Image: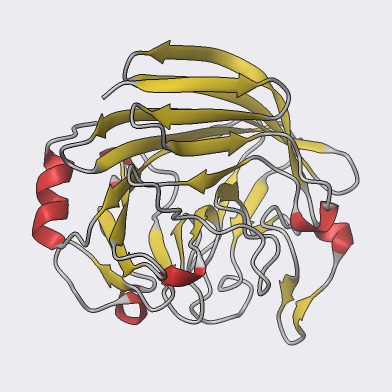
Amino acid sequence: MSIRVTHAHGDHIAVTAANGTEILRYVYRPDPEAFESRKPYAHPVRTLAGHTVTGYRPSDHRWHKGLQMTASHLSGQNFWGGNCYVHGRGYLPLPERVGSMRHDGFGAFTVEDDRLAFTEELTWVEHGGEEWAREVRGLAVHSVDEAAGAWVLDWSIRLTNVRDEALKFGSPTTAGREMAGYTGLQWRGPRDFTGGTVFAPDSDFGADKLMGTQGPWLGFTTEHDEIDGHSTLVFAHAPENLDERSAIHASHWFVRSEPFPTVAFSWAFFEEFELPPGESFAYRYRVVVADGAWDREQTGSYLEGVPW
């Protein structure tokens, strides 16, 4: 299925399917509110049927914006946005700790009939203006399949420490709050995903049981409000992410369906890890956006048919 790509230079990139549905908008123009951690994000993300599957600036967390790369605890700075967790004091508004990610340009940009792939160059800047890290981000939209009712977004990161000291990656859990390991690539769903069904390759136990677990993929399905229809999102690791020989640190799922829907590929859920000066780490992720209520068997079969 062919796609059409439009680029509003300095603002966003949009991908539209052959049926006229805009399925992805990647916004790299910084939002104006520094407290929300200015950085690029993907919103809206839609299924081929036009159902929106990302939320933007919800009332409970204004800094949740679609699908975005984050780091909630990084050497004392907050690249997630919003309040900072301080052990013994809870969540506090500490704007002096909130950093940002600066868009520096696109290293590559390729559009084919059925595929968009680009790399983006970014700099992670702490609140005082010091440059801490360089990122090369890759996004690819592909496998837009009307028959399957699904399409795929691949998202990669390669991050290099440009400080003269180690970068320490953590989470609220590493700072003392139990089972709050959110950090890394994060999805925030719209309100009609609240209470949705979460499942894994070998489990239908739901979000509560899957919080903090490990696995190659996680599915999240819901029935929409107002319309008669379901949508499913699948969050998947590239194989090397789960290989202790190649990954800088073990990944765990941060997932909730109540009181709000969210999933993060947490790279520092239970323990901190350090990135020495001049060194880099990399991860690759996949998000499948599908119409319908998929189950474990359908999800596993689909993923096998879309190799890395």
Residue 168 in picture, x, y percent from top left:
64, 53
Quarter of the rendering occupied by the N terminus = top left
Its colouring scheme is: secondary structure
Residue 86 in picture, x, y percent from top left:
74, 76
> Residue at the spot x=38%, y=35% of the render?
154
Residue 123 found in image quarter? top right
For this rendering, which residue is in front, 270 or 127?
A: 127
Residue 125 found in image quarter? top right
Count of all numbered marks drawn on residues in the image: 0
Residue 303 seen in the figure: yes
Residue 214 seen in the figure: no
Q: Is residue 8 left or right of residue 17?
A: right
> Residue at the spot x=70%, y=29% of the render?
11
For this rendering, which residue is in front, 142 or 131?
A: 142
Q: Is residue 182 left or right of residue 201?
A: right
> Residue at the spot x=28%, y=77% of the render?
206
Q: Is residue 37 left or right of residue 134?
A: right
Residue 286 in picture, x, y percent from top left:
35, 42
Q: Is residue 308 left or right of residue 270?
A: left
For this rendering, which residue is in front, 91 or 171?
A: 91
**Relative to 242, residue 172 above or below:** below
Quarter of the rendering occupied by the C terminus = top left
